[in-house]
Image: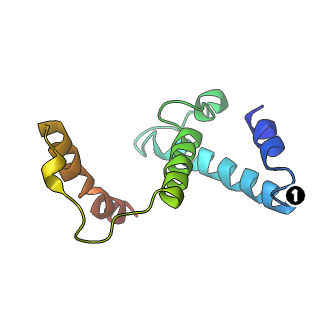
């Protein structure tokens, strides 16, 4: 159902080949994430309904959120280097989150 909705939303913008490539990529990503999130220490339980859920800790949900964030990045310009005013971070949680974000790419590199 979700695929047919998105197919309708990109018809006339994407070619049929691009739509099929996107469906294939999302399908592969969904399966890979579903398998990886279960870990390697036990048997993989294939649950298509759970793995394709559009909310929670699923491949499609993470891909959707990444796409939303990327689209914001295309519209909202990133500040030039040196323009960040860290004094605007007035709450301890904001500073904590910023500190955690700095670990993102090293963790991604370690996992790949």
Q: Residue furthest bottom?
A: 81
Task: Tell me residue 36's x, y (percent).
Answer: 48, 47
Residue drawn at x 50%, y 52% as measured from the top left? 72
Q: Tell me: 107 left or right of 50.
A: left
Residue 98 vertical position relative to residue 61 in the rendered view, above or below: below
Foreground pick, 26 / 18: 18
Foreground pick, 88 / 6: 88
In this figure, which residue is indicated by the disc labeled 1? 16
The quadrant holding residue 30 is top right
Foreground pick, 104 / 90: 90
Q: Helix or strand or loop: what does disc 1 sit on? A: helix
Task: Tell me residue 100's x, y (percent).
Answer: 22, 50
Task: Tell me residue 87's x, y (percent).
Answer: 12, 51
The N terminus: image quadrant: top right
Residue drawn at x 34%, y 64% as measured from the top left? 79
Exactly how many numbered labels are in the figure? 1
Foreground pick, 82 / 61: 82
Q: Tell me: 74 left or right of 107.
A: right
Q: Residue furthest top?
A: 49
Task: Tell me residue 57's x, y (percent).
Answer: 47, 35
The color scheme shown is: rainbow
Residue 93 vertical position relative to residue 77 in the rendered view, above or below: above
The quadrant holding residue 22 is bottom right
Residue 50 vertical position relative to residue 76 in the rendered view, above or below: above
Residue drawn at x 68%, y 56% as measured from the top left? 25
Residue drawn at x 22%, y 50% as measured from the top left? 98
Q: Tell me: 3 left or right of 91.
A: right
Residue 81 vertical position relative to residue 5 in the rendered view, above or below: below
């Amino acid at each position: 159902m979700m695929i047919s909705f998105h197919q309708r939303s990109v018809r006339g913008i994407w070619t049929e080949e691009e739509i099929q490539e996107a469906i294939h990529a999302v399908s592969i990503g969904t399966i890979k994430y579903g398998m990886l999130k279960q870990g390697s220490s036990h048997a993989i339980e294939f649950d298509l309904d759970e793995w394709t859920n559009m909310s929670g800790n699923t491949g499609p949900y993470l891909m959707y959120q990444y796409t939303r964030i990327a689209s914001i990045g295309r519209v909202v310009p990133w500040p030039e280097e040196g323009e960040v005013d860290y004094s605007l971070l007035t709450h301890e949680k904001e500073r904590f989150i910023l500190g955690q974000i700095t670990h993102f790419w090293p963790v991604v590199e370690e996992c790949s």
